[in-house]
Amino acid sequence: MDTAQFTLKEVDTFADNSDEGVNIDCTKTGYFYNTMRVKATNCFFETNYIDYRVYYYVRDWDESMHAKIKYIYNINSPSEFTYDLKNDFFSGDEFFMKIYFNDNEQHFDLPYIGFLLSKRNSVIEFEDLVLPCNDVKKISLIEDDLFSTTESSSIRFDCSRRGLAESVIKIGDDPDKGQYKVVYVIDKLPQGTKMYQKHEVFSPHDIELSKLSSIALKKTGQRAMIFKTMINAFNTNDLNLVDELSVSVYSDVVGDMFKCGEFKFQSGDIVDFKDLVVPCNEIVTVTLTEHDELFNDGHTVLIPCRPNSQQTVDLIVPKGEVSKEIDRI
């Protein structure tokens, strides 16, 4: 294909407006831009012309390395205050991804309109978001507050390492809030770059005990994770020395999150999961939530779905103002 066309149309309630296209010469490689003018009509039927500059990048097609972003999940709690009874009454973090390309600070925002909404310990699953690995300079999250915005720390892809990878990204300065992990796969992907923004958010606060659809219950895979026990080897979070805990699990094969138990824990207690079998392909996430009257503390970890392996995972419920190293796998 020698040419392509990019078209911009201004959508208005009061009148039909013109659109204008930019022809892209695909025979030349490199970074380019074009200016396009759009005719817009306001509520008084006055005509305005708005100029837009469109930046684009043309490269030779090859089987270069790509990064497919699979998930973003909240490790501890959102950076913003949330008030919990059954659900989060406040929204938690509302952010979008800012993807910077190369050294000229060109960037792409995802989603294009609106935000990704993350409640406490949410798992955000992306359907088909594939980026050119070597062309991405960095990725950060832009969190929208009432009066300002906050840009998170940034991550970079290591394109020399194939396979499943994860990177920590942080919103704000509080060590007990705003920690996220971005989970992605580095590989030579035949479909190439796809800026597909469709996603789904799974939150432990939006699900009930053992609530799964009949379709999800019937899903199987070539691998499975068998949950054995959960032990409190240290102490409790609550001052009354009894923790009211729930365990929520997300599986990439099941494609959903479910709660597999609610327990009252004292120091030294143990839960036997009776060999709970969860089918998986690449990952499972586990969230431990401690239910208080007002604030439900939680911690989410990702467990790789490795065949023929035994794994022990630490789940640490934040306690007061004490800062702890979290997410040890």
Image (cartoon, grey):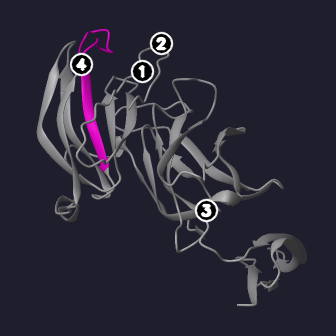
Inspect the image, locate mark 4, and give the three-letter code of the amino acid beneath it: Asn
Dots 4, 3 in contact, CB < 8 A = no
Q: Nearer the viewer, residue 105 or 245?
A: 105
Q: Which one is earlier in the sequence, the residue at label 4 or at label 3?
A: 3
Q: Is residue 236 left or right of residue 134?
A: left
Inspect the image, locate mark 2, and give the three-letter code of the amino acid beneath it: Val
Q: Which residues are magenta?
A: 233-250
Label 4 and label 1: CA atoms lie apart by: 14 Å
The residue at which mark 4 appears reads as: 232
Label 4 and label 3: CA atoms lie apart by: 41 Å
Q: Nearer the viewer, mark 4 or mark 3?
A: 3
Residue 125, compared with residue 229, is above or below; it is: below
The residue at which mark 2 appears reads as: 322
Look at the numbered disc 2 and give the secondary structure of its residue. Answer: loop
Q: Which one is earlier in the sequence, the residue at label 4 or at label 2?
A: 4
Q: Residue furthest front?
A: 160
Label 4 and label 2: CA atoms lie apart by: 18 Å
Q: Residues within 10 Å of mark 4 (few under 14, many from 20)?
A: some
The residue at which mark 1 appears reads as: 318
What residue is at 44 percent from the left and 25 percent from the top?
326
Q: Quadrant of the image for the C terminus? A: top left
Label 2 and label 1: CA atoms lie apart by: 7 Å
What residue is at 67 percent from the left and 58 percent from the top?
134
Inspect the image, locate mark 3, and give the three-letter code of the amino acid beneath it: Leu
Q: Nearer the viewer, mark 1 or mark 3?
A: 3
The residue at which mark 3 appears reads as: 131
Q: Quadrant of the image for the N terminus? A: bottom right
- Residue 24 placement (x, y as % from top left): 80, 83
